Amino acid sequence: MKAVTIPRYGSPDVLEIRDYPNPETGVDEIKIKVKAAGINFADILARKGLYPDAPSAPVVVGYEVAGEVLEAGRDAGDFKPGDRVTALTRFGGYANRVVVKHNQVFPTPDNLSDIEAAAIPVNYLTAWQLVEMSGLTRHDTLLIHNAGGGVGLAVIDLAVKKGARILGTASSAKHDRLRARGLDICIDYRKEDWVQKVLEHTGGKGADVIFDPLGGAYWKKNYQVLRKTGRLGMFGISEVTESALPGVLRFIPMLRKLPFYSPIKLMNDNKGVFGVNVGKLWREQDKVSMWAKEILKGAAEGWVNPHVDAAFTFEEAEEAHRYIENRRNFGKVVLLPDG
Ligand SMILES: NC(=O)c1ccc[n+]([C@@H]2O[C@H](COP(=O)([O-])OP(=O)(O)OC[C@H]3O[C@@H](n4cnc5c(N)ncnc54)[C@H](OP(=O)(O)O)[C@@H]3O)[C@@H](O)[C@H]2O)c1
């Protein structure tokens, strides 16, 4: 089999295609012929050596694929060769063959292409968990940062379904497309004071629910514009890429901006804070599987609309990573093993 490999940490040009022995299929596992593999921001961080969860280089990253079952172990459920499936992979997704536990594999709805299906697992599971933990309702005003990213678009789908009012930050080139997907108020965080804008659009009270993938200076500002009874969900630290310091030293400026939410303060402020990392939920596979089934049902019903901005071949993996790093993507970017 072949896989796009991070042989050592560095810029996108380190990525290379390598050959590996074909993986064996265990009794409770499914072997998949990958048609499309999703790229996530975490993969970019892993390539730079800034993602502590990833195995050290050389490594094949990738958390999600869509394709066709090649082989199913005897205790691997009802899957059979030829079935179209979408799967979560614990690394190793940037490959033309993957072998995964059967409870990480789900039938692909007929109305989705493989490319669209590969855009679902990470973005929508993250969004689902954020919405679930926040208890978002139609009475809430939600603020989603990085609204034009893959997770941002997934959150918008779920928040529209809930009937919430949605504010989002994104660069202005993405605003028209965000409005078309259901964002009520777009804030250009590069040119506008987003804190001021959120207060303006919430009668000075702040947002009921805030989802933040950026971290750093955003941690304290989010808390500041969180309405009383509000819930703040944190799910990323994209701001770490902004530092010019080398390697893990980049975390130092971020650590200096860490907020402190004491129980007494939270009680007196009537606010809730929580964190989300779907990459740390491998021991909660039953819950994750239940969410994945709900999401794929939503896709079959049409209210989950994965948006793929661009697809690159394995040979173009370097370009794909650059596309994301240059912040050109609106939603998902995928890799195609067979061009
Ligand atoms: N905790 C979890 O389980 C989990 C799961 C998935 C993703 N995440 C995290 O969520 C974040 C977003 O992921 P995603 O897949 O939605 O991202 P994505 O699709 O790659 O979105 C990237 C977009 O983020 C915006 N952005 C704002 N500040 C940025 C910065 N400092 N560096 C890079 N991009 C920045 C840019 O849009 P503009 O044009 O608007 O500037 C950029 O185009 C990442 O931090 C990722 O690690 C966490």
Image (spheres, grey):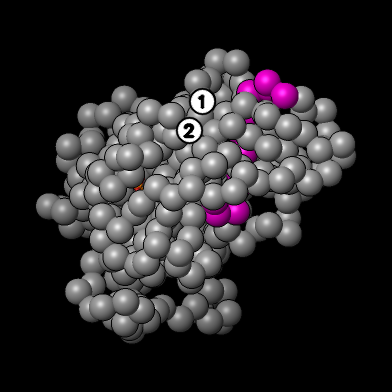
Q: Which residues are magenta?
A: 81-92
Any part of residue 275 in sight: yes
Measuring from the top left, give residue 54's x and y in whole percent.
51, 65
Task: Say the numbered circle drawn on residue 114.
Answer: 1
Q: For ligand 1, tell me if the residue under mark 2 lies within 8 Å.
A: no
Q: Earlier in the sequence, mark 1 or mark 2?
A: 2
- The 10 Å Cα crowd at callout 2, few under 14, some 14 to 19, many 20 or more, is many
Task: Say the numbered circle drawn on residue 6.
Answer: none
| Residue identified by numbered label 2 | 36
User: Is residue 181 or residue 119 the one in the foreground?
Assistant: 119
User: Is residue 221 or residue 329 the one in the foreground?
Assistant: 329
User: Is residue 192 or residue 46 the one in the foreground?
Assistant: 46
Q: If the image is split into quadrants, where does the C terminus sit?
A: top left
Vertical side of 216 occupied by 214: above or below: above
* 156 displayed left or right of 176: right
Q: If the image is split into quadrants, where does the N terminus sit?
A: top right
User: At x 21% / y 50%, what residue is drawn?
Assistant: 326
Quarter location, residue 220: bottom left
Mark 1 in CB contact with mark 2 (< 8 angstroms): yes
Measuring from the top left, give residue 277's x and y in whole percent.
55, 60
User: At x 17% / y 37%, what residue is drawn?
Assistant: 173
Quarter location, residue 104: top right
* 29 displayed left or right of 98: right
User: At x 62% / y 26%, what residue is drawn?
Assistant: 68
- Amino acid type, mark 2: Ala
User: Is residue 3 or residue 247 the one in the foreground?
Assistant: 3
User: At x 51% / y 29%, what residue is drawn?
Assistant: 35
